[in-house]
Amino acid sequence: MTTSIAILGLGAIGTVMAAHWRGLEVYCVPKQAANSHSDEARQPCNVQRRLQLSEATRSAFSDSAFGPGTSSHASELNQEPHSSPQSELELELPCWDGKQPIDWLVVTTKAAHTLTALQTLHQHSEALNKVQRILLLQNGMGQQQAVQQWLQQQNLTMELWLGTSTDGAFLMPDKDNPVRSYCYAGLGEVLVGRALQTPGQELLAVNTPLPPHLKFVPDIQQRLINKLAVNIVINPLTALYQCLNGELVSNTAYHQHFLALANEVLEASKLLEWQLPDDFVQRVTLVAQKTAANRSSTLQDIIAGRPTELAYILGYLLIQVSQLPEEQQPSIPETRKLAEQLQGKGLTVWPQ
Ligand SMILES: NC(=O)c1ccc[n+]([C@@H]2O[C@H](COP(=O)([O-])OP(=O)(O)OC[C@H]3O[C@@H](n4cnc5c(N)ncnc54)[C@H](OP(=O)(O)O)[C@@H]3O)[C@@H](O)[C@H]2O)c1
């Protein structure tokens, strides 16, 4: 039987995943349908997306995936079956009617919208009862725990999976075209694992068949923490200085700030039992060097005038520290000062 997937949040990463899953039964949960209970909003519809492929991502889409007879709901339009290499994919996804059973509901909204998007979907329909698993595929932390608690409160017993992606994609602004176009700039990997309520469930998860481009890891929580810790250093500083990742190590003044923050995060992580590697400072330096020409996602959001995910990055650390008994709370002056500076610039650092 074909795997059925519904994507909640068909933005940059959601569209990338839809492209990887073209051979499967893939649906979109449109924003307006998630927000409305009217029958009109639930009329059959299709959502179109265009995905431009870079040199680096083209190789992920071989001719064979386009061959005749491929059963695909996320179909390609206007593509010659054997015109390789592809430079652009046009995807068309049917909207999920909330009645069709779904193997994976994949949430690719920004962190702040996760719970609201799920709650709205649940409030207006029985749709979530048709879902076998939810996969939260996002940066940041805090939203996963919120969803886990909410599912328990609602007696919703589907499996909760967590994921982290190193793919890179962004919106290509094109006012003249009604179809949203994204650029899939960097081919990465998507690591996933089950959010565990009780020890021992790893073995259940390891046998779950996964859709393409997802790789199972037994320690997803640790992977999320490792990525979060790197983002806590890089993202807020690139937002403060409005600079590329590499400038955090090449500019002497920025670098001093970078080292002070990285060391503070490492110290705090010990009290929070985050189990970061002892060479964390070197590792985060390496990430900044390897991604020297990149704009962090936070800086991209600021430039595009979108809300950032800082409340789920830096804010998560501040919340975790504040929840420790007072005598155990680490002194994190650099982190606190940075949070104040960013708040002063109108950015939300504390979760709302
Ligand atoms: N982009 C990347 O390269 C990348 C890489 C790794 C990880 N990530 C992470 O992946 C997550 C998604 O990032 P993104 O770049 O894909 O963001 P994005 O392009 O803004 O996509 C988010 C999508 O969610 C939609 N949405 C918001 N609220 C919704 C709701 N209630 N119901 C249905 N859809 C809703 C948005 O619709 P509207 O646009 O209409 O508001 C948008 O299409 C973030 O946590 C990000 O940090 C991104």
Image (spheres, grey):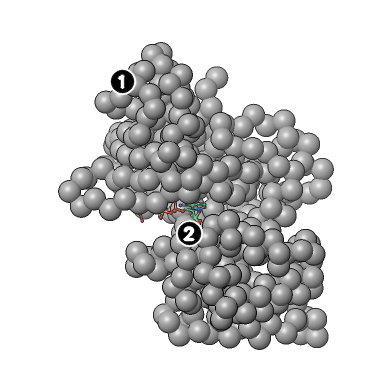
Q: Is residue 223 visible?
A: yes
Q: Is residue 129 visible?
A: no
Residue 330: x %, y % from top left: 75, 81
In percent of width and height, residue 20 lies at 48, 33
Instruction: Name the residue furthest top.
Output: 69
Do the residues under discs 1 and 2 have CB atoms within 8 angstroms?
Answer: no
Q: Please tell me which residue is depicted at 31% across the width and 45% down the height of the picture.
A: 181
Kind of residue indicated by mark 2: Ala
Describe residue 260's horizontal placement relative to residue 14 as left or right: right
Instruction: Report x, y in % for residue 323.
Output: 71, 76
User: Dividing the image into 4 quarters, which one contains the N terminus?
Assistant: top right
Q: Residue at x 53, y 85 (%)?
A: 340
Circle 1: residue type: Glu
Q: Residues within 10 Å of mark 1 (few under 14, many from 20)?
A: few
Decide which of 34, 109 is in the foreground and name it: 109
Residue at 72 percent across and 55 percent down: it is 222
Q: Is mark 2 within 8 Å of ligand 1?
A: no
Q: Front-most of 1 and 236?
A: 236
Q: How many marks?
A: 2
Q: Is residue 273 left or right of residue 92?
A: right
Determine which residue is flagged by label 2. Answer: 293
Which mark, by number, is residue 80?
Answer: 1
Circle 2: element type:
loop
Does 297 appear above or below 212? below
Q: In the shown orientation, is residue 65 left or right of residue 50?
A: right
Q: Residue at x 62, y 48 (%)?
A: 162
Q: Which is nearer the N-term, disc 1 or disc 2? A: 1
Q: Position of residue 291 (x, y in %)?
A: 54, 57
Q: Nearer the viewer, mark 1 or mark 2?
A: 2
Q: CA distance from mark 1 to mark 2?
A: 35 Å
Indicate the quadrant where residue 80 lies.
Answer: top left
